[in-house]
Each structure stands twice: as C-alpha cells, then as structure tokens.
Amino acid sequence: MDDELEPTLPYWDWRQFATATHASNGLPKVVDDATYTNSAGDDVPNPLARAHSLYRSIALGLTGDEIFTRRYTTRLRSNIPLLEDEVERYLTNPNFEAFQADFNFAAHGGIHVLTGGTDTSSPLPRSIGDMGSTVSASYDPVFWLHHAMCDKVWADWQALWPAANIPQHVLDTVVYDGRVGRDLIDAETSLRYIYSEDSVEAAIGALGTADSAPEATLSAAASNVTEVRLGMVKAGFVRAELEFHRMRPPTESFELRAYVDNASCDASTGYKDKSYAGRLVFFGHGTCPGAPGHCNPALAVRDDYDQRYKHPLRYEHTRYRLDITRGLRRFIGRKKTVKDLKIYLVTLDDKGEAVAPEALVYDQCSLRTYAKN
Amino acid sequence: MDVRLTDKAVKDRVLRIWLRRVPEAGGFLQAWHIDANENERQIGSATLYGRGVGSTAQERAMLLFRLPSDTDDLKLSVGDRVQIRIEEGSGFKELNLDVSEIE
C-alpha cells in the first residue's frame, strides 16, 4: 500500500455480540440495517445490507428485487458462543495444515452456512441465502467483512506461533501478481497492514465525518478561531474524540481548546464555559540543535528494510486525539441526534494568548465516537 | 451415509470426514450414533459450505463433528457406527458423499 494512505478495511468479528451494535439475529447493525443516515442526515439504502448479484441476474435469470442478495440468519446468534470456542480451540494448534483445515471447514464455512441460511422463499437452488455456497457468496457484501475476519484469525495464529513450520508449497505458490507466498506471509511487512481492535462503528464514525468536515477560519473579528463542521452526530456514545490527521509536530508549544457550537469563543472563554469540550497540549520540539537537515524528516526516509524507528517529526501517521466526550454529551443533552455539529478550535501559545490557527498544521479533523459494548 | 469412528476421532473427540470434492449442496449436518440394537442418538453437528449449482470448484472439503464426552449411557468406541444426515425441510435425511478419508 502507498505510504501516504491509511485505508481502513473493516472486519466482522463474528465471535462478538452486543445489543448496542448488533441486530437480534447476530449480525452487526452496520450490515443488517436496511438503511443508514448519511452525513447530510438523509436515510439512504445501506450498501452493506445487500447487493446486486450477477449469479442471480445472469446465471439464474432472476429479475426485479430477486437480483439482490439475501440472508436467512435464524441460527447465527445462537452459534456465536460456539464460534468463539472453536476459534480458541483451533488457535492452540501450531500445525499449519491442521489449523487450516479445522478453521476453514468449521468456523469459516460455518459462518457461510449460518449467514446464508435457508428459507422456502429463496429463489436460489435448495432455497439457500447467497452466503451459503461458493458460487454466490462473494456477491453478498458481508462476505468481504467475513473474509477480512478470517485473515485476522490467521494473523492471530501467526502471532501465536511465529516459529511454526509453513509447508513448502505454501511458500512457493504464486499468490498474486507473480508474488509467492513467502513474500506475502508477513502481512505487516510485505502488505503493510495491521489489525486494529477499534469497532466498525468507530471506524465508520471516523470515516463518515472525515469526508464532511470542512474547516474555515471565521471572519476577521474572530480570525483566531477555526470552525469544524462534523455533520450529524448520534447520542448514546461512550466516548467521543476529535482526531487530527497528519498533524505536524510543532516547533513551539501550543494548547488547542475545543468548544461546541460557540463561534464567539476566544482565549478568555476558559475551561468553565459550558461550551468547553476539551483540550490538547503540544510540547514543542524546539529548534534543531543538529547539523543542517538533522530535523528534516524528508531527509530521513526509511526503506522497507530499514529497521530504525520512523523519524520523530514525520507526520504521515500521526493521529492526535482530543477527548470531547463530556462537552459533547452536555451539548446533546436529551436529544437523539444533532444535525450539523460545529466545533470551534482556539489555539493558544505558551503565554495563553490566542494565535493564528495556522500555528498548528494538519490535514484533516474528524470525529470518532465509540458505541457501548 | 454410515462411517465408523476411528481411534483418532475417539481420542480427540473430533470426527473429521474428508470429501474428495466439495459437494454442490451444503447445509446443516448431524452425526447419529447407532448401536447394535439400532438405537439412535445424535452426537454431533457440522456445517457444509457447498459449492452451489453451476460452480466448477474442485477442492476437497472436510466435515468436522465435535463429539461429546463419554456418559454413563453412551460411551464412544473405535469402530462405532455413525450415520451422517443433512437437514431438509423440518427434518434430517440420510445423504451420500464421496468420502476419501475419515480421521
């Protein structure tokens, strides 16, 4: 993957269930709800709930609503404890091929059969849901979240058994684009991705608002305040954070304060104002004491085989988080949602005086909320 | 389809049945222990992720049944007869699969 990008691919941890985040049938709400509310506040069809299947429309010649994938999940929820137990059992086996067989044909296949299910109304052969057979499964959007989870289970197994013997044919087989298994088996190094324990809701929350968080410096009278528009926010979160992406570590020390829906905030607004939501304090790295170029991260590029830590001033992967939970809860009060949430940011120097927002440089600010487990 | 419990299955409490090719039809399967007097008892279940109608998939597949611990009225032994059935409608019916190996 490109060093400059940090795409997020969600995985569905089918070992978990929580009423706040899952539908009663055991599926995460983000894939089960027929609609979702977009950042503009409009209810629109959920693209993760169903999709047009070419197996249905071309191979089976179905038309109308029957071209869309379906799930009949009557047994999924009751099997979640079994799936959790089975994965734990398989992971204890350091034998690659034994783990592969047990995991593939039990939990992996089990999710396919449980998520697909059967129903007499299904137009598919044997009245199954799309996930229930290999020829139709990948048209269901949940297929990809399931297989991302399977990949995570493999990563967990690799972490548990780093010295396990990998069969030669796995190492030698061309997997993709001429690259053999040996070159790809260490995902973090070769494919440049890791697994996060953040919830899907948190990831969607962050992504959903990141695209709709235009910032603007206010009028000249309040030019030291930055307005961040975050769109619609739902109540009921246990934690809310403002994330600053690709923030450049500042030379001087600054304090960044956040106020909810208070366009007139300034350095004197302080911490007791009811709109105050939280703050971040940046400890400036100071001027460079080294030779020319010493503190220029552009001159400290690491290649794939360079084991040194990243240059401390590189900002590509920085993610500063400002906890605004209490302030945002106070503002939302008893409402279920707030449309067009606006956060105002004030940057102060080490003397406590407001400075131009440009003193802190970052690419984007987004809101991340965490649902109850 | 009848199979016989292997030493490994009894010891590990897991019955693994390898199929030469992933079947077209999948679903929920049950394993029934049948004693010499034809008394039946369900001892395990498994899911089979079928290839589906129209698929040319050739891969082999495995059925994995977790077996129960011995109880006073059911003790599993090597060579015991086990019948594999697949759910159909509201019940289960016997099925025949192309078995290559039983573990």
Image (tube, coloured by chain):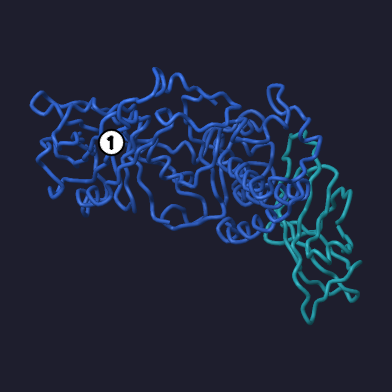
Q: Quadrant of the N terminus of chain B?
A: bottom right
Question: Going 54% across and 46% down the picture, which residue do you hit?
Answer: A12
Front-lying residue, A24 or A198: A198
Q: Residue tagged by mark 1?
A: A230
Can residue A234 be seen at all in this image of the molecule? yes
Toward which corner of the image does residue A67 lie, by quadrant?
top right
Q: Residues within 10 Å of mark 1 (few under 14, many from 20)?
A: many
Question: Can residue B88 be seen from the camera position used here?
Answer: no
- In the rendered image, the residue lying farthest to the bottom is B72
In percent of the image, x 62 and y 50: which residue is there? A117
> Is A186 in front, or is A248?
A248
Q: Is residue A93 left or right of residue A32?
A: right
**Compared with residue B35, is residue A268 higher up or lower down, i.e. above or below?**
above
Which residue is at the front of the view, A199 or A124? A199
Which percent across, then down, holds residue A14? Answer: 56, 51
Side of A113 where B69 appears, left or right:
right
The colour with which the image depicts chain A is blue
Horizontal relation, residue A72 to residue B23: left or right: left
Amino acid carrying mark 1 in the image: Leu
Where is residue A139, by image quadrant? top right
The cyan one among the chains is B
Which part of the image, by quadrant, shows the C terminus of chain B? Answer: bottom right
Vertical order, A130 against B44 (above or below): above
